Amino acid sequence: MQERSSVAELAGILRTELNRYSPGEKLPSSRALVDRYRVSPVTVSRALAALRAEGLVVTRPGAGAFRAARAAEEAPRPGDTSWQEVALSVETSGESVPRSVDASGVLMTLAVPPPGALELHGGYLHPSLQPERALAAALARAGRRPGAWDRPPIEGLPELRAWFAAEIGGGALAPSEVLITAGGQSALTTALRALAPPGAPVLVESPTYPGAIAAARAFGLRPVPVPVDADGVRTDLLEQALRTSGARVFLCQPLFQNPTGAVLSAERRREVLRVAREAGAFVIEDDFARRLAHEDAGPLPAPLAADDPDGVVVHVCSLTKITSASLRVGALAARGPALERLRAIQVVDSFFVPRPLQETALDLVGSPSWTRHLRTVAAELRTRREALATGVRRDFAELALRYVPPGGFHLWLRLPDGADEAALTAAAQRAGVAVAPGRPYFCAEPPAPHLRLGFASAASTGELAEGLRRLRTACDEVLG
């Protein structure tokens, strides 16, 4: 059982058993709870912390945990927040229009499945694949370094900017052209706000990462889809969309695209830069999966930013996917006036990335364990990819797997025409496996129903096999 599941289960048990204790009465000791429920001391500590946050227990150092005093019998009167419906709207031709922000597509991949459910929808490495020991050691060293808790330079630590510049540009990019960001999502939102005014169209791949669609719409931008095939974005349609929409920003993932896994071909790489340059448009390159290449991927194409001396490309990358969801350290690379605007918006939004996180990242990527970690993940992801792809092709004739990418962490499956994605996803949840429907990956009407299956957030190939067995149950229920 995963730690987070056991914490939730133990908290639920203790929450129920609190009725046996009077207010102020002491609960069993942590050691007694460890023995009774056969969990770790960390699990007990976290479960008690959850109950303490709910106001159900109080803890006293050296004395233990006690049931909290009863809350007042009369619940506080709920307020009237209906006025906010008007305040959160905008005036358009004399009419109020709600400005809702739909984060459901992002929340879908961040949601923790119910206890006992297997996670085949997530976008982060399973804890067994994360460099936890190396991260802990790097964090400890970083915290003790002189000046580690001082305010960092606004743009980021010079050494970390230099490391990202070398990784992105291979010598073609200067450290001064890199900004350190709080992860990839933060970098994407900064880039969109900097490069496109409210109400403007923004071209996005179709399908694409739901977080990009949500970020664009949250800032009042209008996502316009450009279809993707096995060779990446259709550059003939990209050129047409730039011309007809008047868009001046195109957001793409040239390497192991999410969700299709496609890699932009060499010919189309040149075409993307050409048509963007001729249209006077920026290309936001989301290079999220470069460090998730599998063992058999072969040489990777350089980032688009490495072939762009004119500042057409604004490059986004992050260390989060290859390490931990909580190491939110990434980079933005740009040239010219765009760099200054990106810097200004980031300063206004968040001042800077906390120095201890930057110091930890710098220590980690400079340690011998870094290359070992990359090799380990590359081998493990290949093994898991093959296990999942083999199982899908063997046991799911009705699901079309047209491409198996040599990088990233997911497979993109086409469902039969007319299949109900929502019903299948719900049935899978009932069967004990979390999967991602395809609809949130499209900013317009999807051409067909799809399903995305991830293999990085599972604990093992055995868990992947069990996940497919449960998905088979759901498919039999919904697809017949």
Image (tube, grey):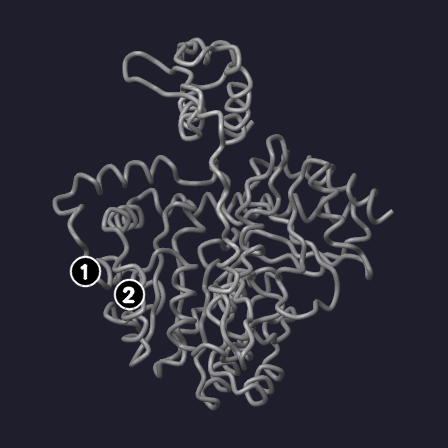
Q: Which residue is mark 2?
A: 348
For the residue marked with disc 2, what is the amino acid? Val
Q: Residue furthest right?
A: 480
Provide the secondary structure element on which disc 2 rests.
helix
| Label drawn at residue 153 | 1
Real-space Cα separation, disc 1 to disc 2, in angstroms? 14 Å
Judged left or right of residue 27, residue 140 is left
Query: 260 or 19, which lies in front?
Result: 19
On the picture, is 284 further left or further right than 62? right
Residue at x 59% of width, y 74% of height: 233
Q: Is residue 268 above or below residue 28?
A: below
Question: Residue 109, position in %: x, y?
Answer: 56, 50
Residue 461 in the figure: left or right of residue 14: right
The quarter of the picture where the N terminus appears is: top right
Residue 170 is situated, as x and y percent measured from the top left of the image, at: 33, 68
Q: Nearer the viewer, residue 432 or 466?
A: 432
Name above or below for residue 294 compared with residue 232: above
Which residue occupies 46% across, 59% down? Answer: 290
Residue 100's image quarter? bottom right
Q: How many discs mark residues in the rendered view? A: 2
| x 71%, y 47%: residue | 425
